[in-house]
């Protein structure tokens, strides 16, 4: 567990301007709980508005295009989300990999574009239930992550990895603490191999998949779990900051 856990809310395709009050409530609670670093990734349409409303928390995007600009109707570039106030982007989420057929190489290209635009990265990885049942979860995740990562300077500052087993996302099923610890240790090993002992040890690895206030403390206390990527429970300030509080307690 990192000294200062990193708790990131992924609002997915949820939220209109009515959600700004929730962003303000999250921000106020984050100001009272400085032992945790808190961030939210609202939909594109709310990035600028949330950025203007908050003082403490960082705002991020949930995707960006590989190109800086051009004839890509409906797409948004990394420079655009940075201009709107985003400081980071979530890339390679399983919903994008599945719903938009994003391959590892597309994720890597998007990551390169994001770095170029000055954004930090949260790169997601995670196996399906079928892959886990076949006993191939670790080899799959390591291969997926290796192929999705860009070349990067200052990886400890600019890169966060999120391990999110697909079968745990939005289902209420979390991975067992033993399985989470085992996977995070493997991911740590890969990061050390790729970026060296010091940077590899400092890159944050988040767990995601049905994290709630009542299971967060146990998950956040595990070795090599430096925080959480939270979907459903990040849509309410109460539940999201309940997770942040549990992470702070786990880090004590
Ligand atoms: C996610 O999609 O990043 C996620 C972790 O969702 P949930 O917390 O709802 O499982």
Image (cartoon, rainbow, N blue to C red):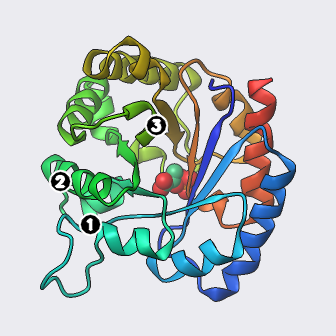
Disc sitting over residue 66 in the figure: none
Percent x, y of residue 142: 26, 27
Q: Quadrant of residue 140?
A: top left
Distance CA(mark 1)–CA(mark 2): 18 Å
Name the residue that disc number 2 marks.
Answer: 109
Viewed as shown, does residue 243 lie left or right of 31?
Answer: left
Label 2 or label 3, whichever lies nearer to me, is 3
Disc sitting over residue 157 in the figure: 3
Q: Residue at x 61, y 55 (%)?
A: 39
- Mark earlier in primary sequence (1, 2): 1
Distance CA(mark 2)–CA(mark 3): 19 Å
Percent x, y of residue 226: 58, 31
Label 1 or label 3, whichever lies nearer to me, is 3
Viewed as shown, does residue 231 lie left or right of 233?
Answer: left
Say few, some or many: other residues with alpha carbon within 10 Å of mark 2 (under 14 / 14 to 19 / 20 or more).
some
Distance CA(mark 1)–CA(mark 3): 30 Å
Is label 1 in contact with label 2 (beta carbons under 8 Å)? Answer: no
Residue 60 sits above or below residue 251 on the image: below
Residue 81 sits above or below residue 89 on the image: below
**Dot 1: what SS?**
helix
Viewed as shown, does residue 69 lie left or right of 34?
Answer: left
Residue 182 seen in render: yes
Percent x, y of residue 248: 77, 34
**Dot 3: what SS?**
helix
Name the residue that disc number 1 marks.
Answer: 99
Viewed as shown, does residue 32 lie left or right of 99?
Answer: right
Q: Quadrant of residue 174?
A: top right
Q: Residue at x 25, y 39 (%)?
A: 149
Percent x, y of residue 85: 51, 70
Q: Nearer the viewer, residue 12 or 129?
A: 12
- Mark earlier in primary sequence (2, 3): 2
Q: Residue at x 58, y 49 (%)?
A: 172
């Amino acid at each position: 567990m990192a000294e200062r856990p990193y708790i990131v809310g992924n609002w997915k395709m949820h939220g209109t301007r009515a959600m700004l009050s929730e962003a303000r409530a999250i921000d106020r609670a984050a100001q009272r709980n400085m032992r945790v670093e808190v961030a939210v990734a609202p939909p594109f349409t709310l990035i600028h508005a949330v950025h203007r409303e908050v003082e403490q928390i960082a705002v991020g995007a949930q995707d960006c295009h590989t190109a800086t600009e051009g004839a890509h109707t409906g797409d948004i570039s990394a420079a655009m989300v940075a201009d709107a106030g985003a400081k980071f982007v979530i890339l390679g989420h399983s919903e994008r990999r599945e719903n938009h057929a994003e391959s590892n190489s597309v994720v890597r290209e998007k990551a390169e574009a994001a770095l170029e635009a000055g954004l930090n990265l949260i790169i997601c990885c995670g196996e399906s239930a079928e892959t886990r049942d076949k006993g191939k979860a670790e080899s799959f995740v390591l291969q997926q992550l290796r192929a999705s990562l860009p070349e990067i300077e200052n990886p400890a500052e600019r890169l966060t990895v999120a391990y999110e087993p697909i079968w745990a996302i939005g289902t209420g099923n979390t991975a067992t603490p033993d399985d989470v610890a085992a996977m995070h240790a493997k991911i740590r090993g890969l990061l050390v191999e790729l970026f060296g002992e010091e940077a590899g040890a400092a890159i944050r690895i988040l767990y995601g998949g049905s994290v709630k206030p009542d299971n967060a403390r146990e998950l956040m206390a595990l070795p090599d779990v430096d925080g959480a990527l939270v979907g459903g429970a990040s849509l309410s300030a109460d539940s999201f900051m309940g997770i942040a509080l549990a992470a702070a307690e786990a880090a004590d």
